[in-house]
Image (cartoon, helix red, strand yellow):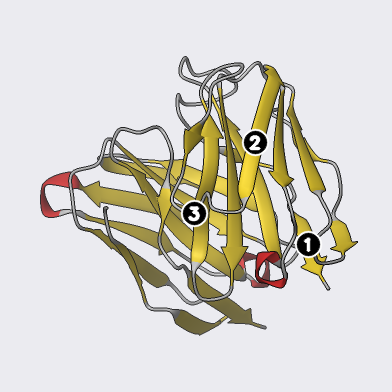
């Protein structure tokens, strides 16, 4: 089974702090994604990566950056956390070739609930 | 960008009832997936269904790509089916655009 893990389930940070959210997948997937989920808005794409050191902006990249130094790990960075970044953050991965399931099927981690005070 | 609309936004069922959830999208897609988010927040992929019909136990899904909609059928619902159901589509950029979801509550 595909496994996607996230470094924390719950996180509390203060305004202005630098925040790192880590995501690791164990199925050699090429693609990795970061979404945020807010009530009534569904999931919105922040950034994605289709290869090591490659990244693409999603629909709401402002205030975020990402890093992908190894294929299995994709990090989301909040350079200076703000209260409007309080949200649920979800990481996902998928394969172009169908590793672990139909190609391009996205597999999600359990999510990180971030509270910025 | 592409618009994804799901209906109904909320649904309350008695255990054993059947239901149909709908997803409309505004442009051609090459990837459509249905997900279930359980009360603990975990998203589980139900179907990868850019076109055609698939069945998995009590769940089935149909996508009519030419008419830009997909349907998720839940038969003989159980309390464990409760949660939020999302439809998500990809137009070729590899990332998914999600609808705002249908919140389902199945009562015993």
Is there one chain holding both mark 1 and mark 3?
yes
Closer mark to the observer between disc 1 and disc 3: 3
**In the image, is residue A12 above or below residue A59?**
below
Percent from the top left, x then y, of residue A79? 72, 48
Of labels 1 and 3, earlier in sequence is: 3
Q: Residues within 10 Å of mark 1 (few under 14, many from 20)?
A: many
> Marks 3/2: CA distance?
13 Å
> Marks 2/1: CA distance?
17 Å
Which residue is nearer to you in this view: A68 or B84?
A68
Percent from the top left, x then y, of residue A15? 81, 66
Q: Which residue is mark 1?
A: A114
Q: Residues within 10 Å of mark 2 (few under 14, many from 20)?
A: many
Q: Which mark is residue A66?
A: 2
Which residue is nearer to you in this view: B51 or A97?
A97
One can see residue B15 in this view: no
Percent from the top left, x then y, of residue B25? 24, 57
- At mark 3, the secondary structure is loop
**In the image, is residue A5 above or below residue B82?**
above
Is there one chain holding both mark 3 and mark 2?
yes
Q: Which mark is residue A60?
A: 3
Figure label count: 3
Horizontally, residue B96 falls left or right of residue B107, namely: left
Is there one chain holding both mark 2 and mark 1?
yes
Horizontally, residue A38 falls left or right of residue A44, namely: right
> Marks 1/3: CA distance?
17 Å
Horizontally, residue B28 falls left or right of residue A64, namely: left
């Amino acid at each position: 089974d595909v496994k996607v893990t996230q470094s924390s389930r719950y996180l509390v940070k203060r305004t202005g702090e630098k925040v790192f959210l880590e995501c690791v997948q164990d199925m050699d997937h090429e693609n990795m994604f970061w979404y945020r989920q807010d009530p009534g808005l569904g999931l919105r794409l922040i950034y994605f990566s289709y290869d090591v050191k490659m990244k693409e902006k999603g629909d709401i990249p402002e205030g975020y950056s990402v890093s992908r130094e190894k294929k299995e790990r994709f990090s989301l960075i909040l350079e200076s956390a703000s209260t409007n970044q309080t949200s649920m953050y979800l990481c996902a991965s998928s394969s172009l070739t169908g590793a672990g399931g139909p190609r391009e099927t996205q597999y999600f981690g359990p999510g990180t609930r971030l509270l910025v005070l | 960008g592409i618009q994804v609309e799901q209906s109904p936004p909320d649904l309350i069922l008695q255990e054993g009832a059947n239901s149909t959830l709908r997803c409309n999208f505004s442009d051609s897609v090459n990837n459509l997936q249905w997900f279930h988010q359980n009360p603990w927040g975990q998203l589980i992929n139900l179907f990868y269904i850019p076109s055609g019909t698939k069945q998995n136990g009590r769940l089935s899904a149909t996508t009519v790509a030419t008419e830009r909609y997909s349907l998720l059928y839940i038969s003989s619902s159980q309390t464990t089916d409760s949660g939020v159901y999302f439809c998500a589509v990809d137009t070729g950029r590899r990332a998914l655009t999600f609808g705002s979801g249908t919140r389902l509550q199945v009562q015993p």
